[in-house]
Image (cartoon, rainbow, N blue to C red):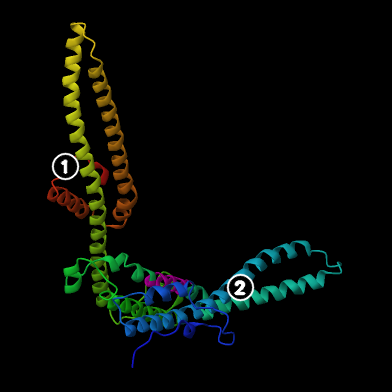
């Protein structure tokens, strides 16, 4: 029996209205088509991605919508009443006024509702869960696109993987296990964090909503943080090497242009000497003058090209490299990697080292 890819209709949320299309995730049709066209994955693997990813995302989004509505509406009501009540009290000072009793009880009821909503927010912890589910919803949405695009950590070659090592590139088949592990880990962390919000004291958990993990001791946390930091540093170094390779192309172009410029300058120097001698002898050589003019124009063009390449290098450093620099704790490691790269490629670093510092 031939295996078939699960039909996109299976994921349509409009059960009663088959003619209408509504999916749990935005641009799901595009995601479905992209997964369908992945030639290096089997039908079983494609179905696994679609069903498991959609199940996890549906769980997160449904809770996110519920909590978002509860949190947003309750906070909005509290803010509005917080403005209206003082205003009503400020004008309700005349007890002989016909509306005095109405305003008095309206303010009392509104304040009572605010107290109830504040207690509900504290009891159900909508504020904490709102930020928790917002965070994980964004992470899950981003993860599927990082995998499909093979960018970020999915672009880093795992040298322990024979296929990636031989091909010198990553693929969807080699990174499938990494992707599934990541979404399962995010799902587990979300559930654990949700339970922890219910259990631990509110005052001790304000800063741990999106990062807590359900662990038994402090030591595993330290080990996990250490491993994550090492992986992150390796990823950042790999991104640095990509930037340096781009800069390398510009430097090679500049060096080639400098060599051409030196050749033209030497030729121009010879022509200028000849022109001076001709003037002493009252000889006017028009072709010589034209050659000198042409060489000057060529030098100006070369200088302009060099300036453009230097500007491209500065932009690359100021934009892409700056991101790595700001997110990397040890600058000595970065500078060491840069110096090693320049040395291995026989490039002069003295001219550019100040840009990296």
First-in-chain label (2 vs 1): 2
Q: Please state the total of marks drawn on the protein image.
A: 2
Q: Judge whether residue 108 can be spotted in this image.
A: yes
- State left or right for residue 252 relative to residue 71: left
Few, some or many C-alpha atoms within 10 Å of disc 1 (few <14, some 14-19, many ≥20)? Answer: few
Disc 2: CA contacts within 10 A as few (<14), some (14-19) or many (>=20): few
The residue beneath circle 2 is 73
**How would you classify the magenta stretch by its main secondary structure?**
helix
Q: Which residue is mark 1?
A: 348
| Quadrant position of the N terminus in the picture | bottom left
- Position of residue 274 relative to residue 160, above or below, is above
Q: Is residue 24 left or right of residue 231?
A: right
Q: Secondary structure at mark 1?
A: loop
Spatial CA distance of label 2 from label 1 is: 61 Å
Q: Residue at x 25, y 46 (%)?
A: 356
Residue 91: x, y in percent? 78, 62
Q: In terms of secondary structure, where does tag 2 sit?
A: helix
Magenta region includes residue 325: no
Q: Position of residue 76 (x, y in %)?
A: 62, 69
Camera-nearest residue between 117 and 325: 325
Quick check: 214 above or below 249?
below
- Residue 142 lies in the magenta-colored region: yes
**Residue closer to the observer: 357 or 342:** 342
In the image, which residues are magenta? Answer: 131-144
Report which quarter residue 192 is drawn in.
Answer: bottom left
Q: Residue at x 24, y 22 (%)?
A: 291
């Amino acid at each position: 029996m031939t295996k078939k890819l699960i039909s996109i209709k299976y994921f349509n949320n409009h059960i009663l209205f088959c003619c209408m299309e509504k999916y749990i995730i935005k641009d799901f049709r595009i995601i479905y088509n992209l997964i369908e066209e992945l030639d290096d994955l089997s039908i079983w693997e494609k179905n696994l991605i679609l069903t498991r990813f959609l199940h996890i995302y549906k769980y997160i989004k449904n809770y996110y919508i519920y909590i978002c509505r509860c949190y947003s509406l309750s906070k909005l009501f509290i803010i509005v009443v917080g403005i209206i009540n003082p205003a009503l009290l400020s004008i309700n000072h005349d007890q002989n006024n016909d509306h005095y009793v109405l305003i008095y009880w309206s303010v009392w009821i509104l304040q009572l509702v605010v107290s109830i909503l504040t207690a509900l927010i504290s009891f159900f912890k909508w504020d904490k869960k709102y930020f928790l589910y917002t965070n994980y919803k964004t992470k899950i949405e981003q993860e599927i696109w990082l995998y499909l695009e093979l960018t970020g950590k999915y672009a880093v070659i795992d040298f322990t993987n024979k296929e990636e090592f031989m091909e010198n590139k990553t693929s969807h088949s080699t990174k499938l296990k990494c992707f599934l592990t990541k979404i399962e880990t995010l799902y587990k962390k979300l559930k654990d964090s949700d339970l922890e919000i219910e259990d631990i004291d509110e005052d001790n958990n304000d800063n741990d909503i999106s990062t807590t993990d359900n662990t038994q001791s402090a030591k595993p946390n330290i080990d996990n943080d250490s491993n994550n930091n090492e992986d992150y540093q390796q990823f950042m170094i790999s991104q640095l090497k990509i930037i340096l390779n781009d800069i390398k192309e510009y430097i090679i172009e500049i060096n080639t242009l400098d060599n051409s410029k030196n050749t033209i300058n030497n030729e121009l120097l010879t022509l200028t000497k000849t022109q001076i001698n001709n003037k002493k002898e009252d000889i006017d050589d028009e072709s010589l003058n034209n050659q000198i003019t042409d060489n000057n124009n060529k030098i100006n063009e070369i200088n302009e090209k060099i300036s453009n390449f230097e500007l491209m290098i500065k932009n690359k450093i100021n934009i892409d490299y700056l991101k790595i620099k700001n997110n990397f704790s040890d600058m000595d490691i970065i500078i060491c990697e840069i110096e090693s790269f320049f040395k291995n490629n026989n490039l002069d670093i003295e001219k550019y080292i100040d840009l990296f510092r």
